[in-house]
Image: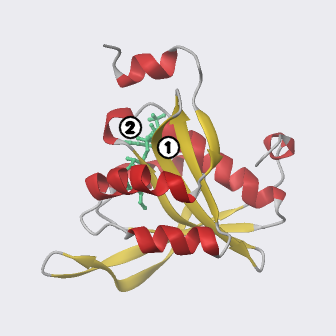
Amino acid sequence: MATAPELLDRGPAIQIRPMSESDISDVIAIERASYQFPWSEGIFRDCLRVGYVCRVVTVSERIIGYGVMSVGAGEAHILNLCIHESYRCNGVGKKLLTFLLDRGTASGMTEAFLEVRPSNTSAIRLYLSLGFEQVGMRRGYYQAVGGREDAAVLKLALRPRRASRQRLE
Ligand SMILES: CC(C)(COP(=O)(O)OP(=O)(O)OC[C@H]1O[C@@H](n2cnc3c(N)ncnc32)[C@H](O)[C@@H]1OP(=O)(O)O)[C@@H](O)C(=O)NCCC(=O)NCCS
């Protein structure tokens, strides 16, 4: 049986498409396996209902990751970004985040923000590699075992790039 990296290496390439209600059961399985304090199905439903940018990444139609972003008042907010554990460290998270940022730019947003746990070093490295910079800290923002954990607030200035001209669903 092919491993996750092998699947990513051979075609068909990974695809990014809009999330639909029927995807939520697959999404929630990845969410629960990835976070100690996962979003509920209701939160994903609400994100779809209010029209946030909700996208899934698929390989051979199987969902291997997803991202959720809100846009408004010139700001894009990355609210969730998650890749199935078996497919991590293969560039998929970077590809999805780049897609979302390009989508935000194409929608006229000039800045992107996100919150991240300071303990989440892999995510922080991804964000820094794309040019995000820390601009603040929200005290006690996250639930944590035995209390709360701070959130680092990261910001990226969005500038139109060639990629933002591609077709972005
Ligand atoms: C954070 C997450 C989305 C990254 O997705 P990914 O597909 O593994 O990331 P990529 O393979 O695209 O990595 C891109 C860059 O991020 C950094 N990175 C990602 N995972 C890393 C790890 N385990 N250790 C060190 N650096 C890492 C590297 O800089 C990497 O660039 P490089 O491969 O050129 O060195 C993924 O780890 C995940 O889903 N984690 C659980 C959910 C989560 O914490 N989401 C973020 C909430 S704020």
Residue 27, compared with residue 108, is above or below; it is above
The residue shown at (37%, 25%) is 4
The residue shown at (54%, 59%) is 21
The residue that mark 2 highlights is: 88
Label 2 amino acid? Arg
Report the front residue among 127 and 3. Answer: 3
Mark 1 crowdedness (10 Å alpha carbons): few <14, some 14-19, many ≥20 = many
The residue shown at (33%, 52%) is 29
Residue 110: % across, % down = 78, 67
The residue that mark 1 highlights is: 93
Residue 19: % across, % down = 59, 53
State yes or no: discs 1 and 2 in contact (Cβ < 8 Å). Answer: yes
Numbered-mark total: 2
Q: Is mark 2 within 8 Å of ligand 1?
A: yes
Residue 107: % across, % down = 82, 62
Please say whether residue 130 is visible from this viewpoint.
no
